[in-house]
Amino acid sequence: MNPTPDLPDAPQPAETPLWRGHPSQWTNFGVYFFCLLLAAGVIAAYFLVPASQQTPLILLGLIVPLLWALSRWVATKCQRYEVTSERVKITTGLLSRRTNELELYRVRDYSVVEPFWLRLVGCGDIALVTADRTTPQFVLHAVPRANQLKDQIRTHTEKMRLRRGVRDLEIDPHVDLPPST
């Protein structure tokens, strides 16, 4: 009797990057616009003050809108998204970083939200409803071509579910079950 040798598992395809990026700086448009108005107000105040009372210290008021706009720009730039064929990663932070990962097979539902001001520049938010207890909703804010990226995520979610043999069971707690006999 010749025992059958164990067959090696089929090689798994390597995880491939699908998209990498940052949220669009357009999310900060309101802050940038307000900082611009604030800076214009400081400059106007400098020139409206009589020449005898003019002091360069008034121009130090430009530091506030400059630092505010710069901090928002850095905060947005330090948020990185990476979508691969197996998971979605969100990395945030400048000095200390935090990376949150979501395995694609855990995604249950997808939606794209395109606020008017983001739609004007071709961006949108992708919201992923997940089966992950720590992160029930995973949002990629202000990404370009959000519908195309959502479709890629959906395609690879289905592939990962098939590869792992994962099925999503939905049970409606409000449905009356027939009495058991």
Image (tube, helix red, strand yellow):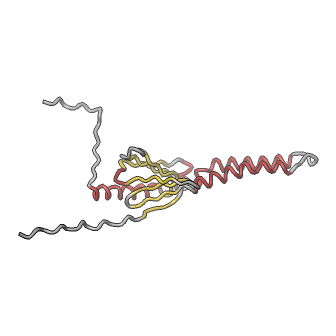
- The answer to whether any part of residue 34 appears in the image is yes
- The answer to whether any part of residue 23 appears in the image is no
Q: Which residue sits at x=28%, y=57%?
A: 162
Q: Which residue sits at x=62%, y=54%?
A: 73
From the viewer's perspective, is residue 175 above or below residue 122? above
Q: Residue 132's spot in the image, x, y percent?
A: 38, 46
Q: Residue 4's spot in the image, x, y percent?
A: 12, 68
Quadrant containing the N terminus is: bottom left
Q: Residue furthest bottom?
A: 2
Quadrant of res 176: top left
Q: Residue 37's spot in the image, x, y percent?
A: 72, 48
Is residue 145 toward the left or the right of residue 7 in the image?
right
Q: Residue furthest left?
A: 1
Q: Residue furthest right?
A: 52
From the viewer's perspective, is residue 50 above or below residue 162? above
Q: Residue 180's spot in the image, x, y percent?
A: 15, 30
Work out whether residue 101 or residue 42 is closer to the camera in this orientation and state it.
Answer: 101
Quadrant containing the C terminus is: top left
Is residue 32 toward the left or the right of residue 105 in the image?
right
From the viewer's perspective, is residue 158 above or below residue 4? above
Quadrant of res 175: top left
Q: Which residue sits at x=24%, y=66%?
A: 9
